[in-house]
Image: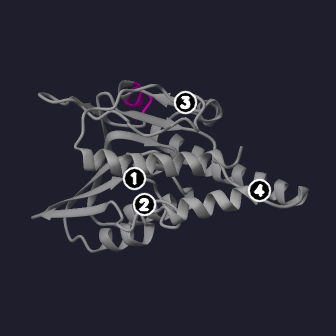
Amino acid sequence: MKAIKLLQLARDNASASMPLRAEADGTQATVYLHGVIGGWWGDIDETEFIKTLTGLNVDVIHLRIDSPGGDVFAARSMMTAINQHKAKVIAHVDGLAASAATGICMACNEVEITQGAGFMIHNAWTIALGNKADMRDAASLLEKIDAGLVNDYARRTGKTADEIVGWMDAETWFTADETVEHGFADRVVEVVGKRGSSNAWNLSAYKNAPTAQAPSQDDSILEHRNELERRFSLLERAPA
């Protein structure tokens, strides 16, 4: 019952406006994915994302990503829409791509990551209620989800499945350089003349999350991000 109450609390506290924004300029467009993935309890609604993406009649789409993750099935539907779009899609990891957000990166034609940004892969999580049979079913589903993610990462990176599984089992956090070194991204982008993005999410639910100082931000932006942090941390702590 506690898990249900925590989920309901997270949903009740959801912001009314989704942080999904698209800007088109000639033959190119930019879509911002800054928030938790999944319309049911997160901020980036997969249906709205797909509608936005399919409505862009451009040659190149830039996805600006700063996300601690979210619903893996919502991310999967977003990945499908990316794969099916006629445009070249370039992922830009502005601050953080963790968990389900890394899958979205894998669906893009190119991935670039800002120096100082982070990239994290781990095994799938869930909240399950019921008897021992239900728990076994939940574990079986998680294994299937993990297998799908392993295939995504392996296809992109050229690494062996065993190596990917080891990283996922350990909950591995990659620096920007490591993300490129291991094949998850194509290049590192240096931010010249201003401070680069640094994750300001509350990642305490993850066991190996690095400590990072957040850059100075406008108060309204910081307030919005803090709200997302509280909700994501609350949801991810529920399985424990």
Pick the quarter of the image with the N terminus. Answer: bottom right
Location of mark 1 (residue): 35
Q: Is residue 69 visible?
A: no
| Left or right for 200, reference 140 | left
Cα distance between the residues tagged 1 and 2: 6 Å
Residue 87 against residue 211 in the figure, above or below = below
Q: Position of residue 139 (x, y in %)?
A: 77, 51
Q: Position of residue 143 (x, y in %)?
A: 71, 49
Pick the quarter of the image with the C terminus. Answer: top right
Helix, strand or loop: magenta stretch: helix
Q: Look at the numbered discs 4 and 1 and tell me whether their residues touch, using CB distance below 8 Å.
A: no
Cα distance between the residues tagged 3 and 4: 23 Å
Cα distance between the residues tagged 1 and 3: 21 Å
Location of mark 3 (residue): 172
Amino acid at circle 3: Thr
Q: Give the mark nearer the N terminus: 2 vs 3.
A: 2
Determine the secondary structure under disc 3: strand
**Residue at position x 34%, y 54% in the image:** 33
Cα distance between the residues tagged 4 and 1: 26 Å
Other-residue count near label 3 (Cα within 10 Å), few / some / many at <14 / 14–19 / ≥20: some
Amino acid at circle 4: Ala
Location of mark 2 (residue): 43
Amino acid at circle 2: Asp
Residue 141 against residue 159 in the figure, above or below = below
Range drawn in magenta:
178-183
Location of mark 4 (residue): 138
Q: Give the mark nearer the N terminus: 4 vs 2.
A: 2
Total residue callouts: 4
**Residue at position x 60%, y 31% in the image:** 207
